[in-house]
Image (cartoon, coloured by chain):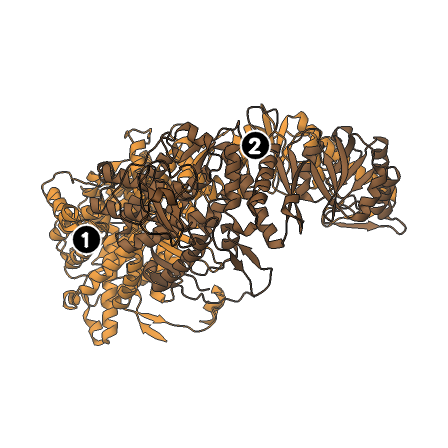
Chain colours: A brown, B orange
Amino acid sequence: MSRLEAKKPSLCKSEPLTSERVRATLSVLKGIVTSCYGPSGRLKQLHNGLGGCVCTTSQSSALLANLSVTHPILKILTTAMQNHVSCFSDCGLFTAILCCNLIENVQRIGLTPTTVMKLNKHLLRLCISYLKSEVCGCRIPVDFSSTQILLCLVRSILTSKPACMLTRKEIDHVSALILRTFLLTIPENTEDHVILGKSIIVPLKGQRVIDSTVLPGILIEMSEIQFVKLLPVKKPGSLKVALFCASLSGDLSDTGEGTVVVSYGVSLENAVLDQLLNLGRQLVSDHVDLVMCQKVIHPSLKQFLSMHHVIAIDRVGVALMEPLSKVTGTRPIGSLGSVSPSTYGSVKDWCTAKFGFKHFFHLIPNEATVCSLLLCNRSDTAWDELKVTCQTALHVLQLTLKEPSVLLGGGCTETHLAAYIRHKTCNEPESILKDEGCTQTELQLITEAFCSALESLAGSLEHDGGEILTDLKYGHFWSVQADSPSIVNWSNLLSRCGCGLRNSQEELSWSFLRSTCHPFAPQTCLPHEAAGSANNLTLDCFTAKLNGLQVAVETANLILDLSYVIEDKN
Amino acid sequence: MAAAASVKAALQVAEALESIVSCCVGPDGRQVLCTKPTGEVLLSRDGGRLLQALHLEHPIARMMVACVSNHLRKAGDGAKTFIIFLSHLLRGLHAIPDQENGSLVSENSQTLGRHWKNCCRWKFISQALLTFQTQILDYVMDEYLSRHFLSIFSSSTKERTLCRNSLELLLEAYFCGRVGRNNHNLISQLMCDYLFKCVAREGGFEEMFELVGDCFVELNVGVTGLPVSDSRIVAGLVLHRDFSGYCPADGDIRIALVTETIQPIFSTSGSEFILNSEAQFRASQFWIMERTKAIMKHLQSQNVKLLLSSVKQPDSVIFYARLNDISVVECLSSEEVSLIQRVIDLSPCVLPQASSRCEISNTAVVKFCKPLVLRSKRYVHLGLISKCSFAPHCLVLCGPVQGLVEQHKDALHGAFKMLRQLFKHLDLNYLTQASDQNYTSSPLIYKNSRESNQLPEIVNGSLQRPYQGTVVKNKDKLAKPQTYLKVYSNLVVPSIELEKHFPCSTPKVTPMDTYQTNETLRCLSPNKTGIIDYGEPFPESNSANSTTENTRIKISYENLQVTKIAGKGSMLPVRYKSREMCSSRSYCFSSIPAGSVLPVGGNFEILLHFYLLNYAKICQQSEEATVGVIVANALLGIPKILHKSKKGNYSFPQMYVRALHALQSGQPMGSRQTGLESVVGKYQLLTSVLQCLTKILTIDLVINIKRQPQEICDQDSEEEL
């Protein structure tokens, strides 16, 4: 009998954002994400008192996944960020900080949510259309004939994750590896649409980062005993491969819902084993050299195959099945009946390899877009961080392939964009005022809130108490070390801007970022040679940042629009 | 524990609810965040959802919520307006001083306690409200309001073509109240595009609305992590799962649908399979394999490239399918299967059990069949070729968080419900009143619930006896020479509440006659399609003179025969008015035409307010007038809230004065608002609220039971009693 229990009434709170508790928790969250941002960001140690390992990180994906937030508003914010990260891998902290900044700034103004949302959306539209336009001064088109920009992009991503604990030399090595891995997944003869291959990250913890390497084909880890057994079989040349997805363990298949009555003396196990051995005989007579199985191979069959010098590898796992069938050109066999010859595949060569203390069986394909990235790092947590970073970088490269442009990093995009928006709303406010039906003052207030949210986002790259400047020509981001003499010739003290594109010897004038300066028109249209010449730029993924910007503004709007929170207490 | 229910208590409850819902109403409304016990977070501006999320405890509040959800099931919109209107009505009722309605209270009840007196008073008012809802409201709607109606169709001919422009306006106004302020333009545009893409042929809108309304869950895909502006429409059907085995195919692709596993199994449930030897086991395994192979071969020879299955298929089936270049999609839900069946008219294949040969004839052609990747999740994308008036398209709804995507889904689903209502005619019937009616000067409204139950039976069986009983009963009450007005609620057609008014001064004679006329009415009822109901209110003259009465009955009898002929002649008696009837009342049947709309922003409310006040002025009956005024004033609450944030020339008082002025001088009402809203929806809302109010007013005690709810068993409880 079901027990009926009365539902507890829900808790209903009005105007949630005005409550002190919500503000306090929001500012705590903001503090956490802001302090992690950028190459000099502070690391967070996440420690769960109830178990699990300690995780040292500064990445949004690890951070947000492990934080347990209870307030519904924070939940909205963090899930929005997590959803963004799971789509684009990059720019999670950017989105989170921008969203927090926007909420905080807008709350301080105290305008009605309707106006705020309308104008925020309008400013967002301005940003997007500028970033996508030809004249955009902070976007560089990617030329795939040289690897320079792509390498800079990967290096920027690695640099911005201090928890990977890499030295400069290691960063160079790993970024080159990542780029090579990416290039290996691109098919050589492309038709009308490109299907990218797959890269498999193979863990090798406790080794030096410099030992990391990338190999074409697939590495299958095996125990030392298997490894020793394999050594005498070694013969050069190509192999004929059979790949099974059905279990070869000899268990009975599903017999249906009814009962099966077996007479005394009839052994079904024997029957199945006979069937397996028949299969083995067929494989041997078909001159198959390598049998791989997703599940378990019966020991008798294994024995039989090794007697006939056929290599048998089982328990491959479902994750490797697709790359394996791609590398070998086989169709995974799903039945124990007679195998048609068309399902066999082949590999060019194979070898055994030992990396660190691990033994691998290495399949070298004829031509396939599958490669294995052997990734080494000293400690477990640093390896985990490095692995996520590599995945991010690979994803970002794929996104860049789809949308071939990158944005200037190091805070320059944000300050440039803020300068552009300020200038635009100051000089031609009529169109906005007419469209949205608001007053000039309201527009000014919201623009200020929006732009200062962008600028303080750029400012949070600086964690060591330094000053932040912006030049009045390009609107780029310059940081100067703390405790520098107050009145000096800036051009001597500064060297390069945040992204590394601009030099301080270019006859620029600077102002402090947070000071109220007169709106100026930042120079648009990047000269082409500028993009090519500089070889040490800091760059950001265009697609991820654009989406992050949109998601941040939309989420902030959503949270600002809340008038009630109804919490179900059941 | 028993607490006296009063208007005051109900008003307090309604006001508390009003304060919550009024923040989300209209284009300037804001969002509410709801958390579920599971930890999910949901954004909503949907009144019904908010009220449910509150899990209210107060009994009156729970009743209101029940009424709201009842209304929503029917109309799909208007929960917030419901609460606002209800609390305004209660406020109006609460403000009536006691003396004004003193005349309504019959003398014998004055000896009872104060509370009971109050209850009686509220009961009379509730009766008056019911009368108002069933008669005056329809009358005002038809007589006055209908001339202001606009239509969503571009031409008024039989073939109704939907005007895209007005549809856009309608949807925009709808989504203004349902989704976040920054997204309503986008969502309404998306919906409009979707509608026009989905309609396969002219005039197929009704069928399409029905199908989309039923299967909306299967026709959209939610994607989180992308901005809302990335939402789009994709042609074809997107199934919420991945291929079990995918083989790329081009050209002529045929699909087949199965509902059972293709591979035969050793034994089905309830049967026994006896294995006597290993050879037998091997042979049967071989047979099973060969058969699976044969079926797949056969499918391939039929050019089938895609196999849809509602159950999980064994691995070997997928293996053989792949060998034969057939893609497989497994574990389709029954809703998905029925949607596919409805769209392409494909019935599942039946696999013969015994013979090794099988004939599969049920296949259909699709344009394409490919995987669709949305945010690293893979879906099956099918280009179905429609065989009905719905051209399959799917909505891909994006949003930064799941809660927002859900909100948009709900709003779109609600919009389909609203449109479905809009495309239907709504019937109105009422009685027009001629000049003077002496008998209603101080009427006692008397509801005989027993009779209302019996009336439908009367028509079938032997009828004299119950009527006799009534007569006797009536006689008792007729000690005072007063007129009784009996209210029969129509039980047969619950959707349109038809009231039967039965004024009779000499009950001895009339019940017989009534019966006869009732029978004639009965005869013509089956021919009609619910537009004219069998329970046609029978007008009974109220003269005290019994000699003239006979003739009058005859006349009205003739009139009814005329109706009968009319009813047989045409199935669509849109408007029937028997003005020549000598009785003082005549009955009108009319309807709000399908697709009627009015400009948004309180236009409907102000119009109705104006005409109700006018009606109340000319109406002599005090309680009808009072109720009319109360309703009219309560109606203004909605435009007041809608114009709350507007200033200057567009503030509510300014707008109100302007509108009244325009109406008095007969000019068209100038409206700044551009959106449109459905008249039917508004009308249904009004009637639902009035019904809810009647319910609230008729309750006198709230009894609190502290015990586990028990299984309700009707027969047992009756026996115990």
Residue B428: give x, y in percent of width and height. 27, 45
Tell which residue pokes out farthest to the left in this image: B665
Residue A396: give x, y in percent of width and height. 51, 39
- Locate residue B337 relative to residue B506 in the image: left or right: right
Q: Residue at x 51, y 53 (%)?
A: A58
Label 1 to label 2: alpha-carbon separation: 58 Å
Q: From the viewer's perspective, is the residue at label 1 or at label 2 nearer?
A: 2
- The part of the image, by quadrant, that contains residue A290 is top right
Q: Mark 1 falls on what kind of element?
A: helix
Q: Mark 2 falls on what kind of element?
A: strand
Q: Nearer the viewer, residue B264 or B113?
A: B264
Q: On the rendered image, what quadrant is the N terminus of chain A found in?
A: bottom right
Amino acid carrying label 1: it is Ala
- Locate residue B719 relative to residue B555 in the image: left or right: right
User: Taking the image as drawn, is residue B490 in sight?
Assistant: no
Please give the count of numbered marks on the rendered protein.
Answer: 2
User: Taking the image as drawn, is residue B143 in sight?
Assistant: yes
- Locate residue B245 relative to residue B72 in the image: left or right: right
Cβ–Cβ under 8 Å for marks 1 and 2: no
Question: Which residue in the structure is indicated by mark 2?
Answer: B370
Chain ID, mark 1: B
Q: Is residue A527 above or below residue B216?
A: above
Residue A246: give x, y in percent of width and height. 74, 41
Question: Which residue in the structure is indicated by mark 1?
Answer: B632
- The part of the image, by quadrant, that contains residue A411 is top left
